[in-house]
Image (cartoon, helix red, strand yellow):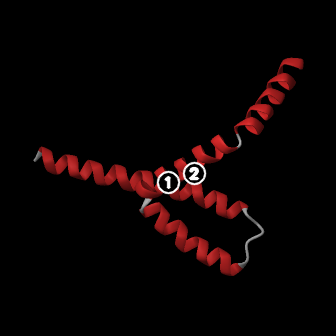
Amino acid sequence: MLQQFLIYLAVIAYFGIACCFFYKWLDFFIEDEEMTSTQRSFSTVILIVASILWVIIVPFAYLELLNFHKKHKGIIDFLIDMSNQTVSEE
């Protein structure tokens, strides 16, 4: 009985997180006004698949983010320092 409850809870949590990712990524797609109708239909399919397979997609996206940050660390630090100086001057 407890095992069944934990499985149901895990499935609900999995699809709950999938829905959160779907709505967040949907906002990004809606805000992009430069997409053609073909790109939008292709992006919709990718959005649905990525939302279902978020447990695989999110770690890879995080690794991409880490690699981007490592590659552009100097520029990112410079922009952060400029931002901090602007805030401290005000």
Three-letter amino acid code at the position of disc 1:
Phe
In this view, the residue in front, 21 or 71, is 71
Residue 56 screen position, x and y as percent:
42, 57
Image vertical order of residue 26 relative to residue 70, above or below: below
The single residue placed furthest to the right in the displayed view is 89
**What's the residue type where badge 2 is placed?**
Glu
Residue plotted at (24% across, 52% down) = 8
The residue depicted at 52 percent of the width and 59 percent of the height is 22
- Residue at label 2? 64
In the rendered image, residue 28, in percent from the top left (x then y), is placed at 66, 58
List x then y, in percent, for residue 61. 54, 53
The residue located at (65%, 63%) in the rendering is 29
Residue 14 relative to residue 42: left or right: left
Instruction: Using the image, determine if residue 56 lies above or below residue 40.
Output: above
Pointer 2: residues within 10 angstroms few (<14), some, or many (20+)? few
- Tell me which residue sits at (43%, 51%) in the image: 17
| Among the 4 quarters of the image, the one containing residue 89 | top right
Query: Helix or strand or loop: what does disc 1 sit on?
Result: helix
- The tally of labels here is 2
Q: How far apart are labels 2 and 1 at the CA level?
A: 6 Å
Instruction: Give percent across and percent down for residue 53.
Output: 42, 61
Q: Quadrant of the C terminus?
A: top right
Dot 2 and dot 1 residues touching (CB under 8 Å): yes
Q: Horizontal placement of 5 versus 85: left or right?
A: left
Query: Callout 1: 10 Å neighbours few (<14), some, many (20+)?
Result: few
Task: Name the residue furthest left.
Answer: 1
Q: Nearer the viewer, residue 74 or 29?
A: 74
In front of the other: 56 or 67: 67
- Where, by quadrant of the figure, is residue 74 drawn? top right
Is 5 placed left or right of 9 in the picture? left
Q: Which residue is mark 1?
A: 60
Q: Secondary structure at mark 2?
A: helix
